[in-house]
Amino acid sequence: MSAAQPFFVTTPIYYVNDQPHLGHAYPTVAADVLARFMRLDGRRVRFLTGTDEHGQKVARSAEALGVTPQQFADQVSAAFREMDRLLDISNDDYIRTTEERHLRGVQALWRELERRGEIYLGRFTGWYCVRDEAFYDESELIAGPNGAKLGPTGAEVEWLEEENYFFRLSAWQERLLAWYEANPEAVAPRSRRNEVISFVRSGLKDLSVSRTSFSWGVPVPEHPGHVVYVWLDALINYITALGYPDQRGDYSTFWPADVHVVGKDIIRFHAVYWPAFLMAAGLEPPRRIFAHGWWTIEGQKMSKSLGNGIPPEALVGRYGVDPARYFLLRELPFGNDGDFSHRAVVGRINSDLANGIGNLAQRVLVLIQRNCDGVVPAPDVLSAADEALLAAARGLQPQLREHIAEQAFHLALEAIWRVIAEADRHINDEAPWELRTSDPARMRTVLYALAETLRHLAILLQPFMPGSAARLLDQLAVPPAARQFADLATPLAPGRRLPPPAGIFPRYVETDTAAS
RNA sequence: GGGCCCGUAGUUCAGCUGGUUAGAACGCGCCGCUCAUAACGGCGUUGUCGCAGGUUCGAGUCCUGCCGGGCCUACCA
């Protein structure tokens, strides 16, 4: 028996300066599906999420509320945990950058970089914008009223001179390019990879990695007054959660990460800085970074000022956790931008879930209930059509494995739905309600093939809609211990009594005329 | 300025290394069925494949230019 192959997947750690909304739910759900899929596939999984809690913005937000930064972070971090609970997220760990294990790891990595000569003390001068937390080049500035200088976003900038530590990013340009070249799958989707490569090709400057203007951060070891730049701090979470600087144990098992799921806005940090930091410290870069796209809400850009971000409670409260999860992954290819509209969600719920898998399950289960005394029937000889249906069902798992390996969730779901349609067709063709009197043995055979197909579908749907899939498996009387992908090979045992069928995916019926 | 991506049926989109009459889903129309969540199945429906050139025996598919949209270009999911 060989040891289960490890699989490490992460979400971004979410910055506590914002409350959780759809934009956070999305990558978290995607990572959860990867984690659940791999567990069901027999892999040893570590699924990490968490919160990023340092930086000037957090300090200021806390101050505005009259609480300490830690209290503020505690509060918001709790809201993110609540989001995970609502969305049925199966993370194995939850890291916060204010935790002791993280501080220790960040400082250890810092020392290592310093020891290797990858960090040096320099002076940073430039136009800084507090609101944007960004430095701007002179050429980017625009003139404001009263001779004020404004950044490209229209917020005021100030001239800043700061003694900073710098990371020798410029020295890593060629090695990064070589890494992208040698690992074509490391940055996905393809268009992001192109962007990243062209960014690196255009030339890398050394990166300022410490701050002295505020103190809410990880103290730079041996250099009082400096705190570690938030991104360096934040990125390291992926290894401090594995016990770094201890490179035995979890670190040796799970690093390098199999997939970092990130938003397209933070691809550069993950695909350029992060691998450079790691390589500079003598550590391995991650295997893959996948950048997802942005959702608009009813055609409008999601933004704090518009206040149109959908909080997890609203998402789950309105549609239910599994339909919401399904929609997010089915509606568009992971990596693309898309629109989250009520109309589109209802369309998916009704045509795919209620009319699709929900109705199929109901027809099969009711037929068995009424015509087989509620017991899984024993099949006679399977017809060619029965075999064809079962072959399609059995063929799903390898297909899904390929799609999931590429984070092509929508293709995985599409493949499942093709089998659902095939099963529906099979029922229509065989008309078990007629066979009941004309050929009961044939009827039992058909219903058995359908039940067995349904079992495959339910097992394979578990990563996407864990609660609903479990209810379906319950109705098929599949014991909880027999729901792994490995169990697909063991056909449903005839003779097992089934509970009375109960609908799993109700139609979404508009309750009010004015859908808000 | 430099770079990346996109523009295909009413809608959302597939169409990888160029090759028979351009596809899917949803929607819509007709028919069938009645086990089922007024669900399911069958058939059908609409396209100057952004525009103009070019390469080729042959181009949504490659090249050039143009038009339109989005994104990246050093720190907001």
Image (cartoon, rainbow, N blue to C red):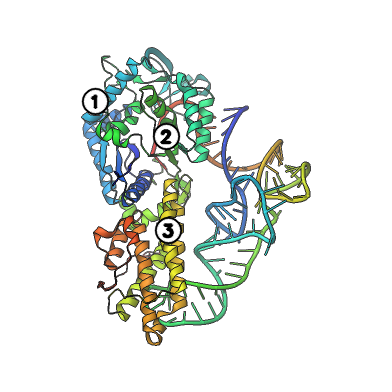
Which residue is tagged 2?
A: A266
Residue A333 x %, y %? 47, 49
Which residue is tagged 3?
A: A396
Crowding at mark 2 (Cα within 10 Å: few <14, some 14-19, many 20+): few
Q: State whether discs 2 and 3 lie on one chain.
A: yes
Seen in the picture, residue A79 relative to B21 is either above or below; the reply is above
Q: Dot 3 lies on which element?
A: helix
In the image, taking residue A229 as reference, residue A73 lies left or right, namely left
Q: State whether discs 2 and 1 lie on one chain.
A: yes
Compare residues A5 and A408 and report the one nearer the observer: A5
Q: Dot 2 lies on which element?
A: helix
Foreground: disc 3 or disc 1: 3
Q: Chain of mark 1?
A: A
Q: State whether discs 3 and 1 lie on one chain.
A: yes
Residue A395 x %, y %? 43, 59
Q: CA distance from mark 3 to mark 1?
A: 45 Å
Q: Dot 1 lies on which element?
A: helix
Residue A330, can we see it? Answer: no
Crowding at mark 1 (Cα within 10 Å: few <14, some 14-19, many 20+): some
How many numbered marks have been drawn onto this rendered protein structure?
Answer: 3
Furthest residue to the front? A1
Q: Amino acid at mark 1?
A: Arg
Query: Residue A425, which numbered label?
Result: none
Q: Amino acid at mark 3?
A: Leu
Residue A174, can we see it? Answer: yes
Compare residues A99 and A248 and report the one nearer the observer: A248
